Image (spheres, coloured by chain):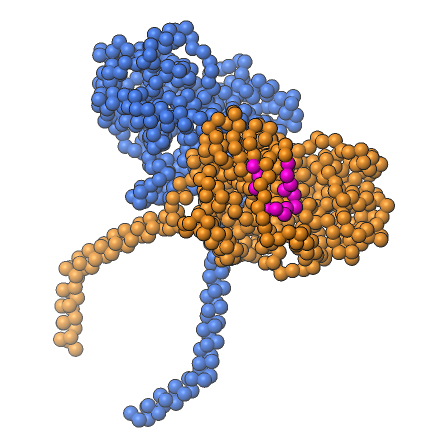
Chain colours: A blue, B orange
Amino acid sequence: MALLLFLSSLHITSGGKLLVVPMDGSHWLSMQSVVKQLKQNGHEIVTVAPEVTVHIKPSDDLYTLKTYPVPFTQELEEHFVSFVNGIFNEQPFLLRVFTDPLTPCGQIVAEYLGIPSVFFLRAIPCGLDSEVLQCPIPPSYVPRIFTTNTDHMTFAQRVNNLLMYMSEFFLCGFFYSPYSSLATEFLQKDITIAELLSHGSLWLMRADFTFEYPRPLMPNVVAVGGINCAGGKSLTQEFEAIVNASGEHGIVVFSLGSMVSEIPMKKAMEIAAALGTIPQTVLWRYTGEVPSNLANNTRLVKWLPQNDLLAHPKARAFITHAGSHGIYEGICNAVPMVLMPLFGDQMDNAVRMESRGAGVTLNVLEMTSKDLSDALKAVIYDKTYKENIKRLSELHLDRPIHPLDLAVHWVEFVMKHKGAPHLRPAAHDLNWVQYHSIDVIAFLLAVVLIVLYISLECCLFCFRKCGWKKGRLNKKSKSKSQ
Amino acid sequence: MALLLFLSSLHITSGGKLLVVPMDGSHWLSMQSVVKQLKQNGHEIVTVAPEVTVHIKPSDDLYTLKTYPVPFTQELEEHFVSFVNGIFNEQPFLLRVFTDPLTPCGQIVAEYLGIPSVFFLRAIPCGLDSEVLQCPIPPSYVPRIFTTNTDHMTFAQRVNNLLMYMSEFFLCGFFYSPYSSLATEFLQKDITIAELLSHGSLWLMRADFTFEYPRPLMPNVVAVGGINCAGGKSLTQEFEAIVNASGEHGIVVFSLGSMVSEIPMKKAMEIAAALGTIPQTVLWRYTGEVPSNLANNTRLVKWLPQNDLLAHPKARAFITHAGSHGIYEGICNAVPMVLMPLFGDQMDNAVRMESRGAGVTLNVLEMTSKDLSDALKAVIYDKTYKENIKRLSELHLDRPIHPLDLAVHWVEFVMKHKGAPHLRPAAHDLNWVQYHSIDVIAFLLAVVLIVLYISLECCLFCFRKCGWKKGRLNKKSKSKSQ
């Protein structure tokens, strides 16, 4: 989760002051477009990041970068490499989950400085976003993250979804406790992470219902899914030449995201063999050792302009790790996908695209060369995949305003009005018992019971008056007769 | 509730076909602006209405009007007059509620023709809109209609709110049963009104959170509150002259809505006396007999350009019946209000504005001349009212796209894509038990109970094996010793 914090300004037209506390990795890449537009609108921007980062670099024309020392230096890159290598060796579930580095440090700073904040995110693990937003998301049709359920679940899947929902209470308390301690220590007051994040004024969520399943939203959530997909840039001469040389068969774009560029040689050779079975030219972002069986149709590149390549009419398929950014680029450009999820929310993302008939999902650990080859041929030659992704693309792009303009508008809104309190639900002022009306229901039940009790007592009283004497008389006469 | 039904067209650019089934009254006035814009975009529009209407009139340049015969003719106007007169004599609660003529006939036609539909509405009585949309609205902080609760309720108000929520189940089944019967008969299949309305593709709701309290929304709801407030038209010479003559004191705009223009003479005289106590020029929309005590500062007019007058810098206060259209015009133009709610949702509307410090609410039946005079002086001279309405106005107008453009976009979206199925939550495919996960919870409880039972049986078994013999021996030895 990334955060924008505002040193609010009264006069937005003469430019405001903006403090940006971003997350590294792909999260920063899409957030950067918002920062760029805000800079163009005349705001003064300061970005705060650790000394050692993957993507957050100084940018004199966009923002002033302030760095803080961290207890790791060159190890960071090594950490990522070992993390990525770990993906290709099966790891226990929890280890994969909790390496996703979503931290709420920015909001601690906002709280300390007493300035309003805007969040920019896809989601927070454990469904903490919904909890914090006071947004009801029934586990009967809203799949929990990491379950790979869709919105149409069997009974067994609903059991699994509810169990996940319940277990998150325990897992997440444990997961977020260091941050709660940090916040409590830094702010000198007892505060939970949910309470801390509930002070965020506005949530720019990278959501769109061509990708997400429809579910309730709160008024302070603005859906900006597809914000990273700015089409229309022309290719460099190098890439243009490769694409043009692909002829009628066109190209396949293959990238496992900005954090993965090397994979074990055995897996690389399996993949290379599969890529050789199709007539398309494959552009594969890969920096590792060249597999010895690499076919002539496959071009290894250290970096590729993913969105611009997908936007090219010759793009036939997209092999992706199913990160949300990549998937939105696939949707924007209507390119059917072969999905190879690696970690985090990627398994869920892949299921979503597959459930919409816009792609084929493969288990990167278990798949054979033939599986990949079959999947590629399916998405390229079975017209339904293209039709489905084209329909999603048309729905996604038919919007009244571009997500980037929407995001910039709402950031400036929060700056101008010093927050957005009119969008904050009163649910924040209720405790759990009150929110669920449990006290009211208990009161009404008590009233009903008291009324019943009094009615019963009245009946008994009447019974005693009229019938009991008779009964006692009967009893006495019985005793006598014994 | 009004409906737009589409004879969908593949080529939106060459114009689509649009069937409009509107509700009469103020509902139609705000919907007309959408119809006008759609006509300008080149769509062919047919409007269906009863032979006798208040506001829906033929309009050759906008649409073709098709009328159908109704069993009332001139009585309609008389009905409205007697209805309005009824307001000024106290009536039982239910009678006032159920005269609000919100009917779902349009959707029956859409269902019959098999075409997608867009709803244009503020709300449906009984919270049927939320029920149909599968939108959770916790009664702990979302006030039910007709309760005059705010989003911050005392315990007693929460009890009242929950009771209203529960009673609506019974009242509404009764209220909507004639429509269910009509739909079942016409469509030749068993269908409830909730099921019928759940087939609507998109809901254009006249909501904005400067007026509504923040609460969950569904993805197929588009908030277009303030759509009726198109500012900037200049006043006619007649009105311009009156406004200019008002001098430094400015004007007060007074209208009780398009359906009310006469009130009982006693009440009219009380009002006239109050209006005479302020130095502002009052423009009062009133067609009844002139009160004999009418002061010099009060001008009676048969009709007034309400929004244009409120948009004038000389507007100091707005006396309104608290219909949602009028309130949005008050918010748009930042004019503090004196609210005199008459029927329907107007009591709730008035409370909302009052709870935001943007107006004073009066009970039109009980108020005295002094009450009105005091209320007017308060909203005109106590700066907090002006400051609060100004803040609401700034929040309301700071939006990335005008509600009218938003409405037109989404109507065309539904026409172009033949609906919006990607925005329909899967909750529609679950029954009540499934939606609330009651079957899953029962299953998990059963599993827990079975596990407990088996554990207990195992313990008992062990106990029997190890302890019972000993126990029996003890017992035997005890018996012997006795």
| Depth order, front residue of B32/B321 | B32
Which residue is nearer to you in this view: A424 or B196?
B196
Identity of the residue drawn at 61% across and 46% down: B51
The magenta stretch spans which residues?
A: B46-59
Residue B334, percent from left and from top: 70, 37
Q: Is residue B133 magenta?
A: no
Q: Is residue B233 above or below residue B451?
A: above
Does A251 sit above or below residue A5? above
Residue A117 falls in image quadrant: top right
Q: Position of residue B63 (x, y in %)?
A: 60, 35
Q: Position of residue B359 (x, y in %)?
A: 69, 45
In the image, A47: left or right of B95? Answer: left
Residue at (35, 37) in percent of width and height: A150
Q: Is residue B58 covered in magenta?
A: yes
Q: Is residue A89 visible?
A: no
Question: In screen coordinates, is B406 left or right of A313?
Answer: right
The image quadrant of residue A89 is top left
